Structures are given as structure tokens and as C-alpha cells.
Amino acid sequence: MTENECFNCKNKSTDAALIRCEVNDEEKWVCVRCLPMLIHG
């Protein structure tokens, strides 16, 4: 199984918790460190 990584900062699940999301019908992962920045700009 391939390890998922944050599409923004490339953190892996061993570095931070990841949350699955979809962008343009494509599955992506974002870490909890990048999520606030993506939500609030």
C-alpha cells in the first residue's frame, strides 16, 4: 500500500494526521497543519 501525503506540503501520515478530500473529482489528502490555511486563505 502506498503511503498518502498532503498535496500541499507533502507531509506523510507519520508526520501529521491526514484528511481525505476531493478536488475536481480527484481524491487528495491534506494534513491538519495545512487545513486552516486552505480554509482561511
Image (spheres, rainbow, N blue to C red):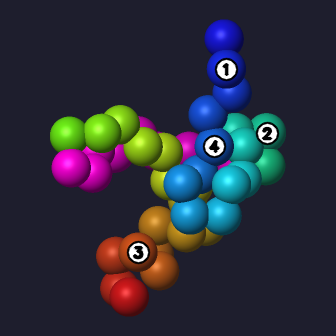
Task: Name the disc covering residue 14, or none.
Answer: 2
- Comparing labels 1 and 3, the label whose residue is closer to the camera: 1
Answer few, some or many: residues within 10 Å of disc 3's Cα (few below 14, many 20 plus, some between 14 and 19).
Answer: few
Question: In the picture provided, is 29 more to the left or to the right than 16?
Answer: left
Within 10 Å of the Cα at label 4, are there few (<14), some (14-19), or many (20+) other Cα atoms?
A: many
39 part of magenta stretch: no
Residue underneath mark 1: 2
Question: Secondary structure under badge 2?
Answer: loop
Quarter holding residue 12: top right
In three-dimensional space, the C-alpha distance between marks 3 and 4, rounded to whole angstroms, equals 16 Å
C-alpha span from label 1 to label 4? 9 Å
In the rendered image, which residue does mark 3 sit on? 38
x, y percent for residue 14 = 79, 39
Mark closest to the chain's N terminus, 2 or 4: 4
Q: Position of residue 34 (x, y in %)?
A: 55, 69
Instruction: Give percent across and percent down for residue 19.
Output: 46, 44
Amino acid marked by disc 3: Leu
Mark 3 vs mark 2: which is more N-terminal? 2
Question: Of circles 2 and 1, which is in front?
Answer: 1
Q: Which mark is residue 5?
A: 4
Looking at marks 2 and 1 on the same chain, the residue that comes earlier in the sequence is marked by: 1
Q: Residue at x 67, y 20 (%)?
A: 2
SS for dot 3? helix
Q: Are marks 3 and 2 in contact (CB under 8 Å)?
A: no
The magenta segment is: 16-24
Amino acid type, residue under disc 1 in the picture: Thr
The CA distance from mark 2 to mark 1 is: 13 Å
Q: Main secondary structure of the magenta part?
A: strand
Total numbered labels = 4
